[in-house]
Amino acid sequence: MLTEGDLGPTSSRVENPLHHAAHGPPPRAGEDCEHSLPFLSRAAMISELSSDIALGVTIPARHARGRAARLGASLDAILANHDYPPVIERLLAEALALTALLGTLLKDPGGQMTLQAQAPGGIIDLLVCDYLGGELRGYVRHDAERLADAGPNPSLFALFGKAYLAITFDQPATEERYQGIVPLEGESLAQAAQTYFSQSEQIPSLVRLASHEDEHGRWHAGGLLFQHLPEGEEGRERLHTRLDHPDWPHVAVLAGSVKAEELTDPDLPLDALIWRLFHEEEEVRLLEPVALSRGCRCDPAYVRSVIARFPADERDDMRGEDGLIRVDCAFCATSFPIDLDEAAA
Ligand SMILES: [Zn+2]
């Protein structure tokens, strides 16, 4: 058994992220070493490894990698723009925690991850979240009347009915685009995400998500993702080889022992959580944390340039009584008045 100080060769780096901001990124270890995490640009905002942060982990001897993420103020900022009922807030909070886990897997700092659940005819017919450079956003389109009839604790199936979960990774630096689509099935979003990894990516994975509104009305969400990786160079572990790797069930049992309240507890730093789960492992490496924040990319100037390309009569049809065209951003529930006459002047 090792002491906490032996948690890994990189653990001391993680304890003081502000220090790194001044000195640049240290060399990384493990198979994640080539990942360019968008850490430095927001490092100054990281005060501790407790909230609005994602932390990467590798357990080299077990051929496993993981991510832990927790959202606090960033989540409140996203939810504050909408006026969702608690059932929807809880679900979106978990979806955003999942988005943080998946988005921080991107190697390309300009890469974008989009998570989309679509359910034609569902109480929720659309849930969209995305990630770019540490920024998260998301929204849920739902039928408020039918939701009210569904009770305080509807199942995932009651909310969506027959639905699909699409996860898209876009990495512009390498022009790589990957999309996987699976049925949205299971008791929870976490189970649906696990199904995604086993069916679409064929990587044995464990996903845990939790969200919680505290007595002050502040939301907390957290997630844990662990995956079994093949030895050697980057590749995809096939499920049929799983039985040959007793390491994975071991990691899955330890990671799976995490409690919902540990995932959401803002007083439990993520490195302490990882230590709690894996302290008996020979070596656990922590990667640089990635700061998370709310961010929307709606851009009135861009919208104006798109609308300006419409024929004049169509533009006139879009105008309101005040002569302005109003464009809504669903992600941040903001309405932009676009004055084309001013733009043309
Ligand atoms: Zn927006």
Image (tube, rainbow, N blue to C red):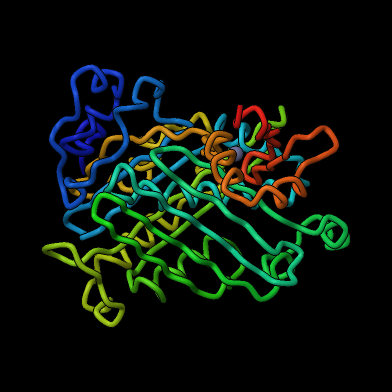
Q: Is residue 150 left or right of residue 162?
A: right
Q: Residue at x 19, y 24 (%)?
A: 24
**Which residue is at a point 41% across and 67% down the rendered structure image?**
179
Residue 257: image location, x then y, percent? 45, 55
Left/right of residue 337 with respect to residue 49 in the rendered view: right
Q: Nearer the viewer, residue 202 or 123?
A: 123
Measured as percent of width and height from the top left, residue 305 is found at: 54, 41
Image position, residue 87 (x, y; %): 74, 51
Task: Tell me: residue 246, above or below residue 48.
Answer: below
Quadrant containing ligand 1: top right
Relative side of 275 to 264, left or right: left
* Residue 39 quadrant: top left
| Viewer-nearest residue: 252 or 241 | 241
Q: Quadrant of the N terminus?
A: top left
Kindly indicate the quadrant of the structure image that contains residue 147: bottom right
User: Residue at left 29%, top 26%?
Assistant: 15
The answer to whether residue 315 is above or below residue 12 is: below
Q: Position of residue 154 (x, y in %)?
A: 75, 62
In the displayed structure, would residue 335 be above or below residue 40? below
Viewer-nearest residue: 240 or 122: 122
Let me know if residue 71 appears in the view: yes
Q: Is residue 135 above or below residue 118?
A: above
Q: Residue at x 70, y 33 (%)?
A: 337
**Would residue 326 be found to the left or right of residue 166 on screen?**
right
Query: Front-most of 180 and 92?
Result: 180
Residue reaching furthest bottom? Answer: 240
> Where the C terminus falls, by quadrant?
top right
Total residue callouts = 0
Asked whether the viewer can see residue 265, the reply is no
